[in-house]
Image: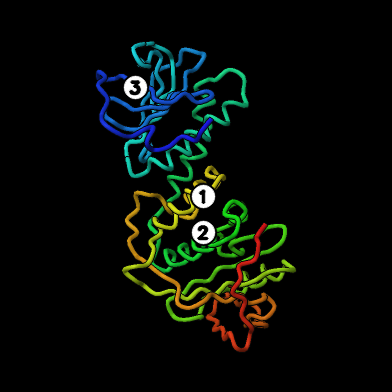
Amino acid sequence: MSALEPSDLLGVIPTVEAGEFLIRRELKRGLAGVSFQGHGVVIFPVVETPSASKRTSGQLRVSVEPLLEIRRGDRREVRPAVCIECIDDALIATFCTVAESIDRSLSATGSVTSAAVLEALRQWERLFHARRRLSREEEIGLWGELWFIQSAASVDKSILAWRAPDPSRLDFISAKFAVEVKTSLSGHEHRTSFDQVRSGDLHPDAFLLSLWVAEARDGKSLKDLVDEIRTRASERNEFERRLLRAGFADSDPYSLRFRPVGEPIYVEWKAIPRVRSFDPGALDIRYTITLDPDDLGDRTTIPDIG
């Protein structure tokens, strides 16, 4: 079965009556299509006759319906179901992944109940609600991490290794390598912390990728990088999950555009400058490091993160 695409859920407002839904794709357990208002929707028929309820959760409208009218071609049917509607078209790519993820989790169960659908949805709702507007520094940092994924030989391996946004850990951790991506507008000068450096020391093959970027009209935005990764990724479910956890959604107004200045440099973790001692009682030690490629030796080939 091909992946659910935004084009399956968007388009001309269907000629259906109020309260009806036009089905365009059948999933394993669900039905995907368009609401009478023209929004993308996924419907999961359930075995019981649930009590009716409606709520809006961020950009999602969720309704539990004892009798829901569905149109498939010339056929109309009425069934008990849970209906999840995306009311923000800018989020439709993420919504497709949410719909497929819920459908996949329900495929592993026996009979589909409204409680099972809502529980599968709840995991994604937590990610949506945890999002907040990124600061400028965080936006630049996320740009560097997405650049790393987009530039890697294996986009999928990089996605699965992505650990952000935990500031005390390295950004990418796999069985072979650990990589911390530091992105700066000020040359190869970066902020780090004692805890993060100590975390990197736990990995025998850890590297710091120093990426110097500049704002540029012909550069790429966060959305540009996200779209490029989506076209190449098989691990779409995991990518969207990690993207939300990192604080990004398509509806966010991130408009800054960047491009790398020169080549990035890789530094072996043991070679980066560090604070080696401090007084007892000093907590949350953070500092700025400056990297000189001539002193540290540069690596401009991105290692296979797999």
- Looking at the picture, how far across and down is residue 65, in whole percent? 39, 18
Residue where numbered disc 2 is placed: 150
Residue where numbered disc 1 is placed: 232
- Above or below, comparing residue 64 to residue 199 in the picture: above
- Above or below, comparing residue 161 to residue 236 in the picture: below
Are discs 1 and 2 less than 8 Å apart at CB?
yes
Dot 1: few (<14), some (14–19), or many (≥20) neighbours within 10 Å?
Answer: few
Residue at figure coordinates x 62%, y 19% from the top left = 110
User: Which residue sits furthest right?
Assistant: 204
Residue toward you, 45 or 281: 45
Residue at mark 2 to residue at mark 3: CA–CA distance:
36 Å
- Looking at the picture, how far across and down is residue 240, in whole percent? 49, 46
Are discs 2 and 3 less than 8 Å apart at CB?
no
Left or right of 175? Residue 222 is: left
- Looking at the picture, how far across and down is residue 135, in whole percent? 39, 64
Instruction: Tell me the element at label 1.
Output: helix
Residue at figure coordinates x 54%, y 24% from the top left = 28
Please tell me the numbered disc located at residue 139. Answer: none
Residue at figure coordinates x 51%, y 73% from the top left = 211
Report the amino acid beneath label 2: Gln
Quadrant, the N terminus? top right
Quarter of the image where one finds residue 40: top left
- Above or below, comparing residue 159 to residue 53 in the picture: below
- Looking at the picture, how far across and down is residue 249, in whole percent? 40, 50
Instruction: Tell me the element at label 3.
Output: strand
Report the amino acid beneath label 3: Leu
Dot 3: few (<14), some (14–19), or many (≥20) neighbours within 10 Å?
Answer: many
Residue at mark 1 to residue at mark 2: CA–CA distance:
9 Å
Give the mark nearest the N terminus, 2 or 3. 3
Please tell me the numbered disc located at residue 22. Answer: 3
